[in-house]
Image (spheres, helix red, strand yellow):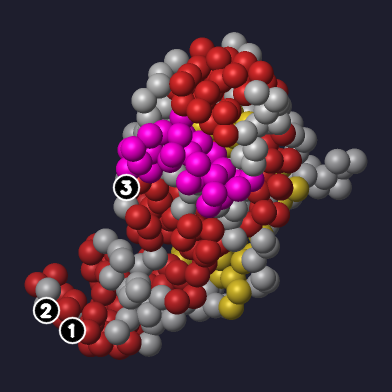
Amino acid sequence: MPLGLLTDLYELTMAAGYVAAGKDREKATFELFVRRLPPGRNYLVAAGLRQAVEYLLRLTYSEEEIAYLQALVAFQNAPAGFWEALRNFRFTGDVFAVPEGTPVFAGEPLLTVRAPIVEAQIPETYLLATVGFQTMVASKAARVVQAARGKAVVEFGTRRAHSPEAGVLAARAAYIGGCIGTSNTEAGFRYGIPVYGTAAHSWVQSFATETEAFEQLQNLLGSSTVYLVDTYDAVEGTRHAARLGSPLWGIRLDSGDLEEQSRAARRILNEAGLTEAKIMASGDLNEARIRRLEQAGAPIDAYGVGTELSTSADAPALSVVYKLAEIQRNGERRFGVKLSSEKETVPGVKQVFRHCDHDVIGLVWECPGCGSDQSPEPLLRPVILRGEPVEEWPELRVVREKAKAAVSRLPEACQSLEAGSEPYRVEWSEELRGLEAQVRAGLRKAES
């Protein structure tokens, strides 16, 4: 799919303006971060980096796209050099990023782009969209998986996602966040995610009897059979499934009182000698409903979570931003800063240093705490240098395993699903605070 026009108009008008003002040779550094955590969230799980990098490496402009832009009134004064820049467009800069699956917090850069200013400006919209969306879903998935207390969670949400492609990326992000797989076969094909699913209510309704529907499904799927038992009556449906016996994986409950139905289903299956048969629950589930089921001791073995996960329904957007941190021209460095109320930014190119129980945001050239007995881990790592990728991508299952381990290392209060828990400690280094004060003072002096 063409990528050049997947951006907001003002990214391109600014790019044209940079060329017209002779600023296109300036090197800019932008940082992508989340201003604040959504309500009820104590951490985020970074995701979407691979799509961001693939976009930057593929970003070009066709003659057809350029002709379209030339016909827009916004570009009637654009210089010829701008169109030449688009024809020759290729990302030649550097990207540093927090690895996917890493827990992150408000104010911490997830992604840093350093490139000639036109190359760094145009990608803003796409980078915000793909990193913001996948981070949002991966973070929701981590909460849902935590609520399930080690039981399997499958992502079911493509049919309610905000587009089919959003469903594919939601499946990917949910897998990073800890789901064991997805119902989306394209996500399975594209990313190697395990896929799950058997039959819907329409399958049962298409046969004269529920028993016949179950028999035909068992003939097809054998030991992978999961009977959806609540088309008519969940208890009777379970009895029909139990009479058929093995082979089967288990049953799925999709509506009603899941705690009560799961207890009745477990008794019926056990009495039929099907003690190994599993019970899966689905139907408008989220971390709160799953936690209540787990606290009640409902005999449920796995959960399918759809709408609430693929849309992160309780927090459907992140306050993710992409801000200029620094600009260089002829060896001279200037720092970008925004002082407007509630949207302030901090000047300078930054690194996040992770200690065992807190983070320090410092300037990229320093290392607060380094040299001590427990030197911190710098989170932002190079992924593109001079327009070329640095290394091969890890398998997604490896990213998932690392994410699970990283979340488990967070302080217990941070892992709580409750809103208002004690926040994770994120500090600024003394040098960063000093630079901010210096830049603010310089701006006041320049404007006086």
Q: Which residue bears the numbered disc 3?
A: 162
- Give x and y (percent) for residue 98: 61, 53
Q: Which numbered disc covers residue 67? A: 1
The magenta region covers 202-229
Report, in whole angstroms, how far the alpha carbon at label 3 lies from the one at label 2: 31 Å
- Give x and y (percent) for residue 119: 41, 73
The kind of residue on which mark 3 rests is: His
**Of 354 and 324, the residue lying toward us:** 354
Q: On the rendered image, what quadrant is the C terminus found in?
A: top left
**Of 283 and 381, the residue lying toward us:** 283
Instruction: Tell me the quarter of the picture where residue 382 sits.
Output: bottom right
- Give x and y (percent) for residue 288: 50, 21
At 11% across and 79% down in the image, what residue appears?
Answer: 71
Query: Element under label 2?
Result: loop
Q: Which residue bears the numbered disc 2?
A: 71
Query: Element under label 1?
Result: helix
Residues under numbered marks 2 and 1 in contact, where contact means CB atoms less than 8 Å apart: yes
Q: Residues within 10 Å of mark 3 (few under 14, many from 20)?
A: some
